[in-house]
Image: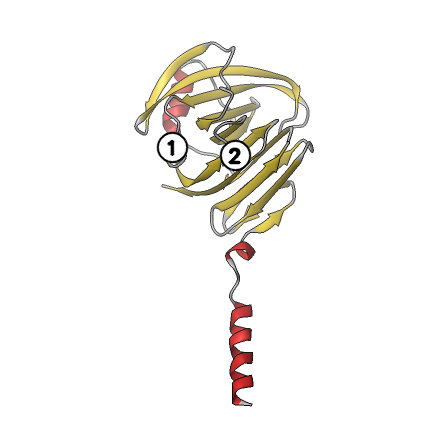
Amino acid sequence: MIGSIALAVVAAASAAIASPLELFKRTSPGTGTDNGFYYSFWTDGGGSVTYNNGPAGSYDVTWSNVNNFVAGKGWNPGAERVVSYNGTWSAANVNSYISVYGWTRSPLIEYYIVESFGSYNPSTGTQKLGTVESDDGVYDIYKTQRVNQPSIEGTSTFDQFWSVRQAHRVGGTVTVKNHFDAWAKSGLKLGTHDYQILATEGYQSSGSAKIEVFEG
């Protein structure tokens, strides 16, 4: 009898301790808050993508034969903050990015501070406007335009601002203010900030990432 009681106590205790996988909750496409962070998960519906919010600023995402998705955690509104992150990104040989990613309104701007990209450089075919040195690296500055494409204000035409790190990395600190200042000097004007996340993006590819983001 005593043995049975002991086994029951052990079983109950084990059940009360969540496994690491249970700490990550599968999340449907959309936006919201989780563990004190803002998250955004957008997909155009092509292929398969599974996004999971985890503790604090962590998330993981796995995708297979997607057309396009963007997902991650951060803040709303965006700001000239210092963003730090770490993790793993298993997409270095396919079309994917790791970036500080956000939007502004009035004007409507989509922006990227790209820390690493895979098989496709997002600046391909564009004119370089300058460079910015920040956080032990050099980033190339570009501007592109999207015509009648999805945005936070529905289907719209809008500019994209880019800082693309020359020496790729997955993990480190991004001093966002340095990029905003450099863009302004290049004539690239942001509007009123909407959200800002540490994003994983995949385009016509398959891969996975597990990221943690925090401020400071």
Q: Quadrant of the C terminus?
A: top left
Residue 196 visible in the current orientation: no
Quick one: which residue is furthest to the bottom in this view? 1
Q: Quadrant of residue 107?
A: top right
Q: Residues within 10 Å of mark 1 (few under 14, many from 20)?
A: many
Residue drawn where x is 39% and y is 37% of the image: 171
Residue 160 visible in the current orientation: yes
Q: Amino acid at mark 2?
A: Thr
Above or below for 99 versus 125: below
- In the rendered image, residue 61, in percent from the top left (x then y), is placed at 56, 41
Q: Residues within 10 Å of mark 2 (few under 14, many from 20)?
A: many
- In the rendered image, residue 97, in percent from the top left (x then y), is placed at 50, 29
* Tag shown at residue 174: 1
Q: Amino acid at mark 1?
A: Val
- Indicate which label's residue lies in the foreground, 2 or 1: 2
Callout 2: SS: strand
Q: Quadrant of the N terminus?
A: bottom right
Between residues 10 and 74, which one lies in front from this camera angle? 10
Give the CA separation, mark 2 to mark 1.
15 Å
Residue 142 shown left or right of residue 107 in the figure: left
* Tag shown at residue 200: 2
Between residues 174 and 189, which one lies in front from this camera angle? 174
* Tag shown at residue 63: none
Above or below for 207 versus 156: below
**Is there a contact, CB below 8 Å, between mark 2 and mark 1?**
no
Q: Earlier in the sequence, mark 2 or mark 1?
A: 1
Residue drawn where x is 40% and y is 17% of the image: 140
- In the rendered image, residue 168, in percent from the top left (x then y), is placed at 39, 27
Callout 1: SS: strand
- In the rendered image, residue 78, in percent from the top left (x then y), is placed at 48, 34
